[in-house]
Image (spheres, grey):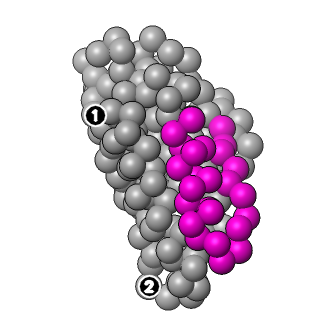
Amino acid sequence: MTNLVILYADLATVTGWASWGPNRLLASGVWRLPRTGDDVGRFLRSAYDAYHAGLSAGDVTSAVFESPIMRSGNETTITTLRKVYGLAGVFEMACRDLGISCTEADYGTVLKHFTGSGGGKRPAKKRRVVQACRDRGWDPVDDNEADALAGLDWVGHVRAIAVPWPCGALFAGRAVGR
């Protein structure tokens, strides 16, 4: 397991990412994609290029991304839907091209694990995840990076990998990775 490097991505125009491996320090940040209006093809091409470069630069062996699920009551345009779902496809394609295993995770499950609650309105959820990061000594630049750190925490604990930071709420009190 010494060569394991996990990357979690919160796919969006500002994609939050976090990576870690047993022989690596925790790293995180954001990849900013260009605003392209209705030009979905240019947007997805830029996303592929950014994801491919980011994944290959970090010696990633396993990638996980937040599922692009649009909840009921979410009013959005068809262009936005194409972009959101397209990001998942190009992320998986970049992983495949680089020989990286790739899976997805449900944000509500990640959030409940990381903060102890998966419910509430979007602004409150985002504040909770940023605060939970700060409680662990991390200082994300925004909620995108915070979501990626939360997802990385979840991946580590679901896969029973001993991570060097306090675990999230769903796994509190359980010995993992031992």
Mark 1: amino acid: Arg
- For the N terminus, which image quadrant? top left
Mark 1 and mark 2 residues within 8 Å of each other at the beta carbon: no
Q: Earlier in the sequence, mark 1 or mark 2?
A: 2
What segment is highlighted magenta in the picture? 29-53
Left or right? Give the position of 150 relative to 178.
right
* Relative horizontal placement of residue 144, taking residue 90 as reference (left or right): right
In the image, 55 versus 165, the foreground residue is: 55
Residue 153 vertical placement versus 61 (above, below)? below
Q: Residues within 10 Å of mark 1 (few under 14, many from 20)?
A: few
Q: Position of residue 136 (x, y in %)?
A: 60, 33
Name the residue that disc number 2 marks.
72
Q: Is residue 35 magenta?
A: yes
In the figure, 163 relative to 106: above or below? Answer: above
* Residue picked out by circle 1: 159
In-image side of 14 versus 10 (left or right): right
